[in-house]
Image (cartoon, grey):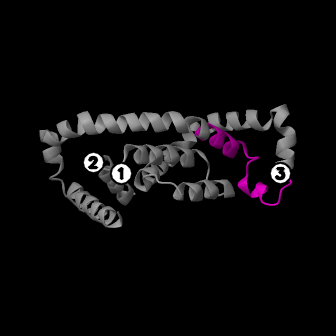
Amino acid sequence: MVKALARALVALNSNVKREQIAGGFACGVLLALVPPGNLLFILIFALVCFTKVNYGMQLLVTGILMLARPLVAPALDSVGWILLNAPPLQGFFTILYNLPLAPLTRFNNTLVAGGLVVGLALWLPLFFAARAFVSWYRAKLAPKWAESRLYKAFTRIPFVQSLSGAISTASRVAGALE
């Protein structure tokens, strides 16, 4: 988790494209809303690995939001139940369930179906919101934060110094990969 945080901070404060950071954020939310332990989660994770998103941001957001998933589980369950009990979709779900690998996705679980639908519905708005946040952060917040006394005192804390070392290592690795 510390490495993911370090990579996310490096991405926010470096020349990583804001679209890559925003894509990592939106994909992290999608992965956090779909419960793990099924083929659908694995397929989404594998698909995201073939895209050019910031993996540090993705892993950080996924890890943090997975802890908060129980808070939104009742809403996801309701959305999944509405989707799975929609009369026009019953024939499609029957055909899908009779396919060989489709039941392994657990699409017929209300939490999985609700998480997928809500995650896909939120993906685009979250992408644009995160992209706008990165632009605002780089233009307004980062310069002010770097000059503050609180930041200078914060950087003297031993844990922060070790995190700074992890960030510089991640930055060197990212630079070597480019």
Q: Quadrant of the N terminus?
A: bottom left
Q: Give the residue at x 86% y 54%.
A: 98
Type of secondary structure dominating the magenta stretch: helix
Which quadrant of the view contains residue 6? bottom left
Indicate which label's residue lies in the foreground, 2 or 1.
2
Evaluate if marks 2 and 1 touch, with contact meaning CB atoms under 8 Å apart. no
Relative height, residue 64 to residue 4 (above, below):
above
Query: Which residue is denoted by mark 1 in the rendering?
Result: 8
Residue 13 is tagged as 2
Which is more N-terminal, label 1 or label 3?
Answer: 1
Give SS at disc 1.
helix
Picture coordinates of residue 20, whole percent (x, y): 42, 48
Q: Which residues are magenta?
A: 97-119
Relative height, residue 177 to residue 11 (above, below):
below
Q: Residues within 10 Å of mark 2 (few under 14, many from 20)?
A: few
Query: Which residue is denoted by mark 3 in the rendering?
Result: 97
Q: Is residue 140 left or right of residue 82?
A: left
Give SS at disc 3.
helix
Which is more toward the observer, 173 or 86? 173
